[in-house]
Image (cartoon, grey):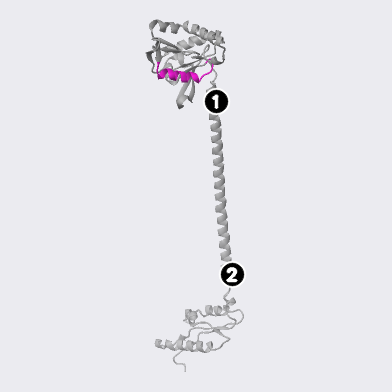
């Protein structure tokens, strides 16, 4: 335990406060019982003291409560206390006096440093032991975890009752909560910013896909229109004066005479080809209509020939060839 603001007092004020505190502590029931049984070691610290109890974990807690109740009549002593259950060794100091040392005392001081005037703070370790007793359970108030000296994480519990303890949150924990709130708010803002960025990215990607789809559709339409325009009616690219000689048919009973029909077609094509102003459709282009007259497709051939030119065109009708002809 120590007196808050002790170093700011005048020397005579410090002496008076230390004297009053020693008197209050010595008059507590737990102090006298520990002294009588040899289960208590006391260590002065200048602005306060250390009381090491070697009995049950309730002994230091009962002593702290008794001191706190007595201090209600001494407002000039703003005292804070920290309690921890841990390893403590009895030693003999340079004056051959009984003394104590160990990690348990250091940890009790770390717990005390987390509080303000009037606070009785406990480490989680001793608070868990007290929670097994019904009379203490309702007076334990968990403050959470805080980082203390050397980066140690410490869980602290406040002991507060009707006539003892400080019900307010210690300033260090209040500052910690504010920092956590700021960090949480910053994290939320960062998350919201990231979320807005992702949404904007998704919308941009969607707009890009829609744009690509529209561009593709428009390009396809233009390409289709261009193809349709390019594939203009045949008459626009067929010369004005042109002629097509359809294959002749062999009507004789001798199938071997079919070459005469092909020969006549070749002779006609050769003769027509000598006319410079006349374009003769190639023989290969009209061979698909061989037998058109026999198959009753002559009507299909005739419109095709006329479509070749809207101005001037001619199609030689298939001539029936017979070996009986002279």
Give 142 or 178, whichever is nearer the viewer: 178
Q: Residue at x 55, y 30 (%)?
A: 181
Question: What type of secondary structure mainly makes up the magenta span?
Answer: helix
Q: Quadrant of residue 311?
A: bottom right
* Whole-percent x, y for residue 220 in the image: 56, 62
Give 4 or 46, whichever is nearer the viewer: 46
Residue farthest to the right, as pictured: 311
* Whole-percent x, y for residue 106 in the image: 43, 19
Residue farthest to the bottom, as pictured: 326
Residue position for label 1: 175
Residue position for label 2: 229
Q: Give left or right: position of 191 versus 53.
A: right
Q: Which numbered mark, 2 or 1, is in the foreground of this view? A: 1
Q: Earlier in the sequence, mark 2 or mark 1?
A: 1
Above-or-below relation of 95 to 179: above
Q: Which residues are magenta?
A: 101-118
Q: Residue at x 48, y 11 (%)?
A: 65
């Amino acid at each position: 335990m120590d007196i808050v603001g002790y170093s700011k007092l005048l020397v005579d004020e410090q002496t008076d406060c230390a004297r009053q505190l020693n008197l209050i502590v010595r008059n507590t029931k737990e102090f006298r019982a520990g002294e009588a049984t040899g289960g208590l070691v006391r260590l002065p610290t200048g602005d306060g003291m250390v009381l090491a109890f070697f009995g049950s974990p309730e002994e230091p807690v009962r002593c702290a409560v008794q001191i706190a109740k007595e201090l209600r009549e001494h407002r000039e002593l703003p005292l804070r206390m920290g309690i921890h259950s841990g390893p403590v060794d009895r030693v003999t100091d340079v004056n051959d006096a009984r003394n104590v040392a160990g990690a348990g005392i250091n940890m009790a001081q770390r717990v005390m440093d987390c509080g303000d005037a009037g606070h009785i703070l406990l480490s989680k370790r001793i608070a868990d032991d007290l929670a097994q007793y019904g009379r203490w359970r309702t007076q334990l108030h968990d403050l959470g975890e805080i980082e203390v000296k050397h980066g140690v994480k410490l869980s602290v519990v406040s002991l507060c009752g009707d006539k003892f303890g400080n019900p307010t949150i210690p300033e260090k924990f209040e500052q910690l909560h504010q920092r956590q709130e700021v960090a949480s708010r910053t994290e939320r803002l960062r998350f919201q910013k990231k979320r807005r960025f992702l949404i904007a990215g998704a919308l941009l990607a969607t707009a890009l896909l829609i744009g690509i789809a529209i561009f593709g559709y428009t390009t396809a339409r233009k390409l289709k229109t261009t193809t349709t325009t390019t594939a203009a009616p045949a008459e626009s690219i067929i010369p004005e004066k042109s002629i097509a000689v359809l294959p002749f048919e062999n009507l004789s009973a001798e199938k071997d005479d079919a070459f005469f029909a092909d020969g006549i077609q070749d002779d006609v094509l050769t003769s027509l080809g000598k006319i410079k102003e006349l374009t003769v459709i190639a023989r290969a282009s009209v061979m698909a209509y061989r037998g058109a007259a026999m198959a009753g497709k002559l009507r299909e051939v005739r419109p095709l020939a006329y479509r070749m030119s809207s101005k001037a065109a001619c199609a030689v009708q298939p001539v029936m060839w017979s070996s009986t002809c002279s």
